[in-house]
Image (cartoon, rainbow, N blue to C red):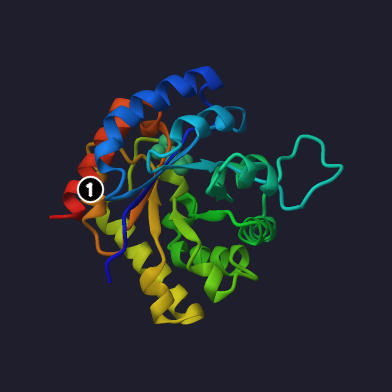
Amino acid sequence: MSRKLFIAGNWKMNKTASEAAEDVSKFIDLALGVAGKINIALCPPFTALDRVSLILENTGVELGAQNLSEVESGAYTGEVSAAMLRDLNVKYVIVGHSERRQYFGETDEVVSLKANRALQSGLLPIICIGETLEEREANKTFEVIQAQMKGSFAGISKEDMLKTTIAYEPIWAIGTGKTATPEQAQEVHAFIRKIISETYGAKTAAHVIIQYGGSVKAANSGELMAMPDIDGALVGGASLDPVGFAELIKNALQVATE
Ligand code: PGA
């Protein structure tokens, strides 16, 4: 089963709209040649979506957001709805990133509400899951992943699962420079695919894209993508520099097509 690589850059709370516009233009010049061979998305902050959206038009590089509200509309000061994102040609939305879970109290239940809201509204969610260092050291990784999947994917139909990307992001590897080894990541990716297969069937499991996230950079993107169940990456820090991010993508693509 061949799955098309999918690499997304999560800029988190970095870059003003002006900075984002400048960097996206640079990135597009560098990445245009590979944009058809691989799925690429950039996820800038909300404030830069509008400007970045115009630059990405007809480039083959897609736009993603980092969060959305679980409710449709109304008196929810400071929130951003799925319809607002769709109107800016946003295609993907990151849901349940560990920073949202940790700093903003998002539970698996909230994550599932957000993912379902995204799907109902025509957005493709990238649902993040991952264990802490403590949990890994206590040999609880699989247990934690299974529970997160059960809670965060609640209510997602088989059809919608095919539109959902899963990002496995071990929390101890995020922004720490400490990447999971390709073998460590592969082990969890294979486990995630097994759970998808048990829940949704083998055919669905064979199609679902599972990204790895956590200190992915140009120097390690190739070896990670060489693993059979790693289908892409969710990249934080290393996606901020357009030159480095384009290189990361090229290295990943090179290994995946070997
Ligand atoms: P990082 O972040 O690449 O900076 O480790 C990944 C993420 O949080 O998605």
Evaluate whether residue 175 shows in this view: no
Say above or below: 35 vs 51: below
Q: Residue at x 43, y 63 (%)?
A: 139
Q: Residue at x 41, y 27 (%)?
A: 24
Residue sitting farthest toward the left: 258
The percent coordinates of residue 156 (x first, y second) are 60, 69
Q: Residue at x 45, y 59 (%)?
A: 138
The percent coordinates of residue 172 (x first, y second) are 43, 45
Is 225 left, or right, of 76 in this rendering?
left
**Quarter of the picture holding the C terminus:** bottom left
Evaluate whether residue 18 shows in this view: yes
* Label 1 crowd bin: few (<14), some (14–19), many (20+), radius 10 Å: many
The percent coordinates of residue 94 (x first, y second) are 54, 48
Q: Quadrant of residue 174?
A: top left
What residue does disc 1 label?
253
**Quarter of the picture holding the N terminus:** bottom left
Q: Quadrant of residue 41?
A: top left
Q: Residue at x 30, y 48 (%)?
A: 36
Is 4 left, or right, of 143 in this rendering?
left
Q: Amino acid at mark 1?
A: Leu
Q: Nearer the viewer, residue 20 or 187?
A: 20
The percent coordinates of residue 230 (x first, y second) are 31, 58
